[in-house]
Amino acid sequence: MKKSIFLFLTGVLLIMCLSGCGKTEYNLLYDGYGFESKKTKYTAGETVTVYYDLIATDTDYSFFLDCDDVSFKQDYDNSHGFVFTFTMPDHDVTIGVKSRNSMEYDPGAMNGYGNNPDGADDGTDAPAGKGMWVCPECGYNANTGGFCSNCGRKKDA
Ligand SMILES: [Zn+2]
């Protein structure tokens, strides 16, 4: 008698779990704009497909999920853009994107120091000829007068 009650209770628990727990849906959330999926709620074990088509040129994208226990597959499709697939775990999942401009910014390229604008530079800081002086302000090295002929700075006494 006791055994049948135990079996009965086990059966009830199983049915409750199959009909209850098994149908629990979890939220698919987006961190950022541009994500798209057929549904916003998935049951655990279901395959989730997310598209991302907000793609700009010269931009690097790194996509992530907010949990460590789920790994996703990243593909690229010409009609959809990025395509992500993963298996829905038994909790909500947020998919997000971090983007940054991939154009390399090189501040040194805009600020070459020591080059003389008129081409008198011979590659050194030495005067270009006898009796000439190098301007400490702009680096022009072929000055002969009392003032720099490139920037107008007064010659040091
Ligand atoms: Zn000068």
Image: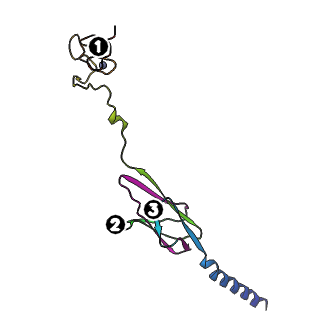
Q: Residue at x 28, y 26 (%)?
A: 115
Magenta highlight range:
40-67
- Residue type at tag 2: Asn
- Choose the circle earlier in sequence order: 1 or 3: 3
Q: For the residues labelled 1 and 3, say whether their Cβ atoms are less than 8 Å apart.
A: no
- Front residue of 141 and 125: 141
Q: Marks 1 and 2, Cα distance to the nearest angstrom? A: 64 Å
Q: Nearer the viewer, residue 153 or 1?
A: 153
Is residue 44 on the magenta stretch? Answer: yes
- Left or right: where does residue 81 sit relative to residue 90? left
Between the residue at mark 1 and the residue at mark 3, the CA separation in whole angstroms equals: 61 Å
| 104 is higher (above) or lower (below) than 42 | above
Q: Is mark 1 within 8 Å of ligand 1?
A: no
Dot 3 amino acid type:
Gly
Label for residue 147?
A: 1
How busy is the neighbourhood of tag 2: few (under 14 within 10 Å), some, or many (20 plus)?
Answer: few
Crowd rating for badge 1 (residues with CA inside 10 Å; few <14, some 14–19, many 20+): some
Q: Which residue is mark 3?
A: 34
Q: Quadrant of residue 43?
A: bottom right
Of tags 2 and 3, the one toward the viewer is 3
Dot 2 or dot 3, earlier in sequence: 3
- The secondary element bearing badge 3 is classed as loop
**Which numbered disc covers residue 8?**
none
Q: Going 25% across and 11% down the picture, which residue do you hit?
A: 145
